[in-house]
C-alpha cells in the first residue's frame, strides 16, 4: 500500500526536496539528529517524504508511522492537519504529532514514545 503513495507528482517531489534543503526548525533539527542513521533503537526514518498529496515530516516505512512536528505554523490549521491524519490513517499509517516545544524541552520523552509505538507495531506482527 505504501508504494502507490510514494508515486508522487513532480511538484510534490520538488516541494519535498526544497523542504529537505531549506527545512529545519530547531525542533526538526534536534529530532532528526536523533532519528537519522538508525540512531533511535535501530529504527530507520526518512525525513520530508512525499506521501501524495502530502509530505510527511518523518516516516518509518517499516512501521507505517508518520511523525509530525507542529509549531507556530500549525496554529489555525487544525482542520487541515485532521484531514491529513485521516487520509494517512485510511492508508494504514499511524500519525504521531508532537509540538516543537515538546521536542526542544523533553526530547527523551518524545523518543521513548516513538520507540514504544514502533515496538507496539512490531509485536503485532510477531504474534
Image: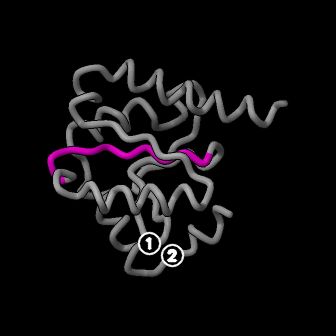
Q: Position of residue 36 (x, y in %)?
A: 46, 37
Residue 80 vertical placement versus 117 (above, below): below
Q: Is residue 66 magenta?
A: yes
Q: Nearer the viewer, residue 26 or 121?
A: 121
In this view, the residue farthest toward the bottom is 10
Q: Quadrant of the C terminus?
A: top right
Residue 39 vertical placement versus 83 (above, below): above
Give the alpha-carbon distance from disc 1 to disc 2, as whole Å. Answer: 7 Å
Q: Is residue 123 left or right of residue 17?
A: right
Residue found 54% across the figure and 46% down from its top: 94
Residue found 82% across the figure and 31% down from its top: 126
Q: Nearer the viewer, residue 105 or 29?
A: 105
Q: Is residue 23 left or right of residue 7?
A: left
| Picture disc at residue 8 | 2
Q: Is residue 95 left or right of residue 78?
A: right
Residue found 43% across the figure and 43% down from its top: 67
Dot 2 falls on a residue whose secondary structure is loop
Could you classify mark 2 by the number of other residues whose Cα lies within 10 Å: few (under 14), some (14-19), or many (20 or more)?
some
Q: Is residue 7 left or right of residue 112?
A: right
Q: Quadrant of the N terminus?
A: bottom right
Q: Position of residue 64 (x, y in %)?
A: 60, 48
Residue found 35% across the figure and 34% down from its top: 31
Q: Quadrant of residue 12?
A: bottom left
Residue 30 vertical placement versus 6 (above, below): above
Q: Position of residue 84 (x, y in %)?
A: 41, 61
Span colored in magenta: 64-73
Which residue has dot 1 on it?
Answer: 53
Q: Is residue 19 magenta?
A: no
Report if the CB atoms under discs 1 and 2 are less than 8 Å apart. Answer: yes
Amino acid at each position: 500500500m505504501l508504494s502507490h503513495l510514494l508515486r508522487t507528482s513532480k511538484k510534490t517531489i520538488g516541494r519535498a526536496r526544497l523542504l529537505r534543503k531549506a527545512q529545519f526548525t530547531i525542533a526538526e533539527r534536534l529530532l532528526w539528529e536523533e532519528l537519522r542513521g538508525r540512531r533511535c533503537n535501530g529504527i530507520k526514518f526518512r525525513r520530508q517524504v512525499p506521501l501524495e498529496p502530502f509530505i510527511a515530516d518523518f516516516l518509518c516505512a517499516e512501521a507505517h508511522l508518520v511523525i509530525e512536528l507542529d509549531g507556530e505554523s500549525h496554529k489555525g490549521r487544525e482542520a487541515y492537519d485532521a484531514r491529513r491524519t485521516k487520509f494517512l490513517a485510511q492508508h494504514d499509517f499511524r500519525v504521531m504529532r508532537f509540538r516543537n516545544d515538546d521536542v526542544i524541552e523533553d526530547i527523551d520523552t518524545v523518543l521513548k514514545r516513538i520507540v514504544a509505538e514502533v515496538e507496539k507495531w512490531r509485536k503485532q506482527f510477531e504474534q
